[in-house]
Amino acid sequence: MIERFLTDVPTGGNINGTGEVSAARFLINGGIPFGEHGLLYANAAYVSKKVLSFANYRTPYWRQDRGLLHSVTDNGGKNYITAATLAFPSDDPNIYRGYVGYVPTFEGDLTDYNFTAGVKDELNGWASDLSFTLGGNKQSYTVDNTVNRTLGTASPTRFRPGGYGFNHAVGNLDISKSVTDAFVVAFGAEARSESYTIFAGDTASYSGEGANSFPGINAVNAGTNTRFNLGGYVDLSYDITKDFLINGAFRTENYSDFGNASVFKLSSRYKLANDKAVIRASYSTGFRAPTLHQIYAQSTQASFVGGTIQLSGLFNNRSAQARALGIPNLKPEKSTNISVGVGLNPTKNLSISLDYFKIDVEDRIVYSSSISSSDPNSTLGQILSKAGVANIQFFINGIKTSTSGLDYVVSYRNIGLGNGTLGINLAGNFMLTNEIVGTPTEPQAIKDAGSSILSAQIKSLLTESRPEYKSILGFDYTVGKWSFGLNNTLFGPTRFQDLDNGGSIMNHIKAEFDPAVVTDLSIGYSFTDKVSLALNCNNLLDVLPKWDLVALNAQGAAAIANPADKALLRGFLGFSGRYDILGYNGSQFSQLGRIFNMQMTVKF
């Protein structure tokens, strides 16, 4: 049956490519001056977006629809299932005459808004800026042309699985003054209120096994969580000489859910050769509280694992599952940052900069491995069974990371060319180190099941999935009302160990992505100083990622020594062989190929 169906439908019925997107955007920005230095200002934006995409095709021999999604036809005599192969033996085989399967839709509706109003003024040399911001977004989902098999013939075919929302209100006050020509002081405060809401799906979307392709959010996981934080800072700058500047800043915050945190920054700059060269350096500490999403998000979804579809669960760190497994609550990340650099301006139009950076993050929050158990009687196995999922994941303070590299920028402007002006820019970075320091502590229940919170896949994602180097060579040309931009981006190699799709053998093999250059072109025309049109083409030459499998040891080499075995593994990594042109995960640039878009800007 499988061979017969795939002979007739070689694509397996899947609808591939980018989902259909429709969006409306609104933006307004304005200000009203008052007095000698005052300004009342406000801006607002609103976005409404709808995305239509498709889940994997449910082939007739894999999933049946209980007669809900198709009409009984002869279909030219085709018959891909029999009574012996029905998933539901109680069904009447006659309702599947001509049945060819179904493809669920996956629809997303997004609304996003922000509004800021404020007042700026200056009195006796003291500059002040007081503002208030409201913002938020909501993402809701719809799945259609599918069924909840648990409900049998009573199942709907369209579901509302729920969604997520986030809102915040922020007040800021910033005050600064040049006390002397050499000494500048600034200080301020911020108050922020945040709320994160999980919306439950309709009951049919999560009952039993839930809507096929995307189970809904259970009502027990829905709710709204909030927090409040208040922060203040002081910033001092002093020119010891006209060439030598030192700067120091200190910030402290109090979170309603994490208590107090304080960070600081020290920096300096020294000018040479009549400002044609600058040496700069800084040292700072950082603090990042877990987002409300990371703390409270919880969901179940269908995903490809080892070439098959399984239900996977994201459980938050305050859930019963987390407590049973010994997963601790999230705590804030802390970091230290060092940078040293030099800037050169040999001529008015030429500028060059080179900076070294090193960032160390402790208690870094990461998304855990996909945790599963082959022993249903283990603690982990029982938790998975009770939750109705094959594997489970958490956000965890899993590791300490250390990253260092070089950033560079070279810019040459105002080059006369014909009747226009040309600008040339070269920018990029080179990664020196990107490593995980130490080993995270494994909860006993997970260790006993032979699983890990930090698999080779997660380690690979954190340390190797970013390009070793990246450079952008750009040309900007303006002539009259026309403007042209041509950017060529060189992406260095990346590597990825995709255990989700390749299985455990990927502990011994990496997918290695080759360096490539992606070219983007933009053409703009200004009809007036308030109306302009731009045509953009991303990935002009339609470059797609290229990759191959590289063995890490003898076991990996043996697994791909046979061309047929290697092709099969590439098939799993390339989404069951349908997209062998690239890997399902890990590519260092877009997998979508050439994309066109047009934009018109009207200013009032």
Image: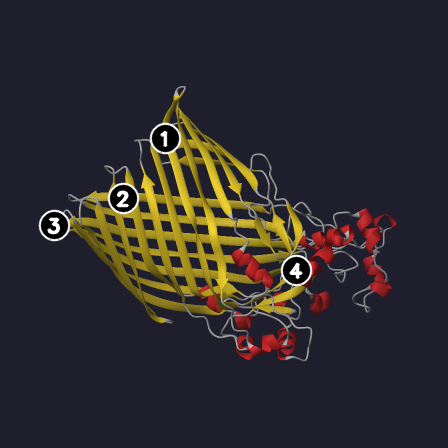
The residue to which callout 1 is attached is 413
Q: Earlier in the sequence, mark 2 or mark 4?
A: 2
Q: Earlier in the sequence, mark 3 or mark 2?
A: 2
Q: Secondary structure at mark 2?
A: strand
Q: Secondary structure at mark 1?
A: strand
Q: Earlier in the sequence, mark 1 or mark 2?
A: 2
Amino acid type at image mark 3: Asn
**Cα distance between the residues tagged 2 and 4:** 60 Å
Q: Residues within 10 Å of mark 1 (few under 14, many from 20)?
A: some
Q: Secondary structure at mark 4?
A: loop
Q: Residue 340: x and y, percent?
A: 34, 50
User: Is 157 or 533 nearer to us in this picture?
Assistant: 533
Amino acid type at image mark 4: His
**Cα distance between the residues tagged 3 and 1:** 39 Å
The residue to which callout 4 is attached is 508
The residue to which callout 2 is attached is 31
Q: Residue at x 48, y 45 (%)?
A: 24
Q: Residue 500: x and y, percent?
A: 64, 61
Query: Going by the image, does 419 lie left or right of 248?
Result: right
The residue to which callout 3 is attached is 124
Q: The N terminus lies in which quarter of the figure?
A: bottom right
Instruction: Report if the CB atoms under discs 3 and 1 are less than 8 Å apart.
Output: no
Asked if 48 appears above or below 226 in the picture, the reply is above
Any part of residue 537 in sight: no
Instruction: Report if the CB atoms under discs 1 and 4 are less than 8 Å apart.
Output: no
Amino acid type at image mark 2: Gly
Quarter where residue 450 is shown? bottom right
Q: Residue 600: x and y, percent?
A: 45, 35
